[in-house]
Amino acid sequence: MKYLLRALAQRNFRLYFLGQSASFVGTWMQQIALAWLIYRLTGSPFMLGLTTFAGNIPILFLAPFGGVWSDRLNRRRAMLLTQSLSLLQAAVLAGLTFAGRIEVWHLLAAATFLGLVNAFDTPLRQAFLLEMVGLRENLPNAIAINSLMMNGSRLIGPALAGVVLAAAGEAWCFLLNAASYLAMLAALASMKLSEPPPPRNHPHWLAGLKEALRFAWDFAPSRYLIGMVALVSFVATPYASLMPVFARDVLGGDASTLGLLVGASGAGAMIGVLYLAGRRSTAGLERLIAFAGISAGIGLILFSQSATLWLSLVLLPLVGFGIISIAASANTILQLVAPDAMRGRLVSLHIAAFLGVMPVGSLVFGVLAERFGAAATVAVGGALCVIGTLRFASRLEVMRDLLAPHYVQR
């Protein structure tokens, strides 16, 4: 257990853990409430996909620029700004919903605004991890614990959202999310950091982005890893935006059923990040990615054909385990091989591949689900995930040879 939680020995990271955990729970509550409200107002799978698209597409185009600025700015001060803006959008949603004046375009606008903020906030948070834990050998554990927070909240937030939705309605979910950002703001304000000296001789921001793109493409493991993350994000993650369809139309449930389904996927993700946090070495993570891709693909295929709640709850952990293991493992490898001066930019490319490609997949799969049904669409996504993973697995030997010197050096 001591090794599993070693990054929490650092006071700053403990503060981050407490504040971010509360914020993640609130974020999941808002996501569930937003999806449920959209589907209640429109009854359209396409609108579910469009909402996910609007909330994440800014990350695809702006996260690389967020990475550039995260290598230039004081990261804590920048995060105080981004977290405050996130609080503002949640408070506006709560106010409109309490007043009974909420409309679909309000929800789409709020999702888009939050996506713009996250395009800068997410690279900041990832690049900020090393400053909080201090030692590079603690970084893989910090990345895993960060994923643990996100997926632990995925168990709590949706379940809590289901209760609040049934008892009080969507507005209270939005309000609780707004309150949760206060915990993160307090944590950031309480940290005691040795402020790093401002980097010197910055290249032009566009030149800095080109430098990171060149590194990511020329170094074959980073090219394969980012490509694998983008593939899984496009074909596997869209199932989440279609979850209200499965909860209500396939399984005949309600908001509580939706919370259970999302929580089941989160349970599998928790298993994945706990395994990653407990690893004593980063060697072999590329093999884990291959195994996780097969797990996610097969899980999606079987889940798409399930017509009973208990079977769906058994299968979804395979999907959650696979997706988060791929994303977190790739993030860990990329942060370890990245030069310190380029860490924020390289991480931002990973973020763009994972969170930025996701809305494109959600929109495409939303259109397909509207025409062919959610079950057939998710099954196709699972099959494509398996095929892409087999292609990735054929490159494992090359990756292992190229990564070995970096593991020894770091």
Image: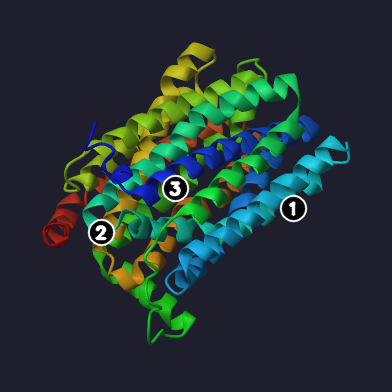
Residue 103, given in percent of the width and then of the height, sits at: 84, 43
The residue nearer to you, when weighing 259 against 143, is: 143
Crowd class of label 1 (few under 14; some 14 to 19; many from 20; radius 10 Å): some
Tell me the amino acid under the disc marked 2.
Leu
Q: Is residue 339 left or right of residue 381?
A: left
* Residue 298 in sight here: no
Question: N-terminal of the two: label 2 or label 1?
Answer: 1
Which residue is denoted by mark 1 in the rendering?
109
Which residue is denoted by mark 2 in the rendering?
336
Residue 253, given in percent of the width and then of the height, sits at: 65, 16
Residue 258, given in percent of the width and then of the height, sits at: 60, 24
* Residue 131 in sight here: yes
Q: Nearer the viewer, mark 3 or mark 2?
A: 3
User: How far, Cα to Cα, is label 3 from label 2?
Assistant: 21 Å
Crowd class of label 3 (few under 14; some 14 to 19; many from 20; radius 10 Å): many
Tell me the amino acid under the disc marked 1.
Ala
Q: Is residue 257 left or right of residue 170?
A: left
Which residue is denoted by mark 3 in the rendering?
16
Q: Is residue 43 left or right of residue 383?
A: right
Q: Residue at x 46, y 30 (%)?
A: 266
The residue nearer to you, when weighing 9 against 205, is: 9
Q: Residue at x 21, y 53 (%)?
A: 137
Residue 287, given in percent of the width and then of the height, sits at: 21, 43
